């Protein structure tokens, strides 16, 4: 039986840590479905369609990986797509408690779906989307931590390239830089 795994997240934006987990998952499972939570409450910097486009580019070299989006209950979505596995990445201990809670809640909601945790390469074990945005906002470089396309778009959106630029985002648009 072919095993389809769902890897859910906000991916705002995708980092090399996410890609590390996706790559590990793609070796382990027949198919990996990267599922972007639309998550408007989190006020994402990148809209759903842009997050999706970026992820599709970043995962283009992995033929058994597809990108989709969802809202509502993850287990409902997984069941609908025929996925038996939920993949999550574990960085430091700080991820553990929240992930543990989520995994047990999801099991309670659907005992047929198993959550599998994977650890990224050490180089990415401190990396988060939030931190990447913070560093760019403060003028630092995130080269090597995100795909080049993400670096470029972050620069345009919140880095030096943001001046006089595009649609502004909470605290990240024109006139808000220090
Ligand atoms: N660097 C990383 N290494 C391993 N797993 C990661 C990494 N970054 C995120 N993940 C995992 O990817 C999944 C989706 O995470 P999410 O989209 O919330 O990313 P995030 O980087 O934590 O973003 P944010 O900073 O906005 O919370 C979660 O299971 C999370 O633990
Ligand atoms: Mg997170």
Image (cartoon, rainbow, N blue to C red):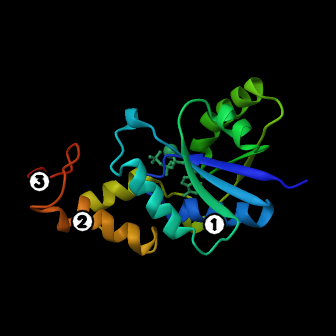
Callout in the foreground (3, 1)? 3
- The image quadrant that residue 95 belongs to is top right
| Mark 3: secondary structure | loop
Tally the marks: 3
Q: Name the residue nearer the viewer: 119 or 87.
A: 87
Residue 44 is situated, as x and y percent measured from the top left of the image, at 36, 44
Relative to 165, is 77 above or below?
above
Asked whether the viewer can see residue 50, the reply is yes
Relative to 150, is 11 above or below?
above
Q: Residues within 10 Å of mark 1 (few under 14, many from 20)?
A: few
- Describe residue 106's horizontal placement relative to residue 148 as left or right: right
The residue drawn where x is 56% and y is 51% is 68
The residue drawn where x is 79% and y is 62% is 28
Rendered image: mark on residue 174: 3
Work out how far the residue at label 1 is from the one at label 2, CA to CA, in angstroms.
28 Å
The residue furthest front is 80
Identify the mark nearer the N-term, 1 or 2.
1
The residue drawn where x is 76% and y is 30% is 107
- On the image, numbered disc 2 is attached to which residue? 156
- On the image, numbered disc 1 is attached to which residue? 121
Identify the mark nearer the N-term, 3 or 1.
1
Work out how far the residue at label 3 is from the one at label 2, CA to CA, in angstroms.
11 Å
Identify the mark nearer the N-term, 3 or 2.
2
Rendered image: mark on residue 17: none
Ligand 1 within 8 A of label 3's CB? no
Residue 7 is situated, as x and y percent measured from the top left of the image, at 64, 50
- The image quadrant that residue 149 belongs to is bottom left
């Amino acid at each position: 039986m072919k095993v389809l795994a769902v890897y859910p997240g906000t991916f705002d934006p995708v980092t090399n840590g996410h890609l590390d987990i996706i790559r590990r998952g793609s070796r382990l499972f027949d198919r990996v479905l990267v599922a972007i939570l639309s998550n408007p409450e989190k006020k994402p910097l990148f809209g759903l369609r842009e997050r999706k486009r970026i992820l599709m580019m970043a995962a283009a070299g992995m033929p058994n990986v597809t990108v989709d989006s969802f809202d509502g209950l993850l287990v409902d979505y997984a069941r609908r797509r025929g996925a038996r596995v939920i993949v999550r990445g574990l960085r430091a201990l700080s991820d553990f408690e929240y992930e543990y809670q989520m995994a047990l809640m999801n099991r309670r909601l659907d005992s047929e779906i198993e959550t599998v945790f994977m650890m990224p390469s050490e180089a990415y074990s401190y990396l988060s989307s939030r931190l990447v945005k913070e560093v760019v906002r403060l003028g630092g470089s995130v080269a090597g931590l995100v795909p080049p396309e993400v670096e470029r778009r972050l620069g345009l959106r919140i880095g030096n390239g943001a001046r006089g630029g595009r649609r502004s985002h909470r605290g990240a648009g024109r006139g808000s830089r220090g």
